[in-house]
Amino acid sequence: MFDNLMFGRRQVMNNMTWKSIDVIVYTLLIIGAISWGWVGFFGIEPVALLFGNMTSLSKLIYSLICLAAVYDVLSMPSIFRRWDIHLNDHPAHV
């Protein structure tokens, strides 16, 4: 009986940890998208302005955004399960 309870508690904590990672990843993706929007619309590179052109810190920021995108693409089915997202459950009627 207690094994089930402990497993359930660990599972919830584990799920919350992954959800926290998901939120961090999406925050990085939004920052990256806005940054690229500034480059496209205004020709301004916010990361380079704030941290220098290709300094160690700016490379770290670019790398984190890249890893966030790779994580998002590779773990999309898990993210949908964690956040209880169902696609095409109720198709739109015309």
Image: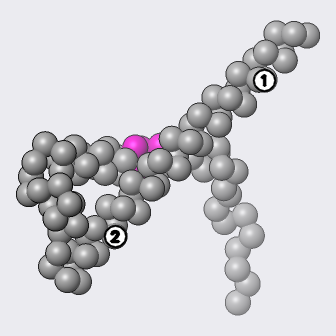
- The residue at 47%/47% (across/down) is 24
Pointer 1: what residue?
8
Which residue was labeled with disc 2? 34
Q: Position of residue 73 (x, y in %)?
A: 41, 50
Answer with left or right where residue 29 lies relative to residue 1: left
Q: Read off the magenta span.
A: 71-75
Label 2 secondary element? helix
**Screen quadrant of the C terminus:** bottom right
Residue 4 percent coordinates (x, y): 83, 15
Residue for point 28% across, 67% down: 35
Give the class, few, some or many, for how many residues have Cα within 10 Å of label 1's Cα (few <14, many ≥20).
Answer: few
Q: Amino acid at mark 2?
A: Ile
Residue lying at the far bottom in this picture: please name it: 94
* Residue 12 picture quarter: top right
In the visual, does 57 lie left or right of 88? Answer: left
Furthest residue in direction front, as rendered: 50
Q: In the picture, which quadrant includes the N terminus? A: top right
Q: Nearer the viewer, residue 73 or 30?
A: 30
Q: Nearer the viewer, mark 1 or mark 2?
A: 2
Residue 77 visible somewhere in the drawing:
no
Q: Main secondary structure of the magenta part?
A: helix
Decide if residue 1 is in sight here.
yes
Q: Position of residue 81 (x, y in %)?
A: 64, 45
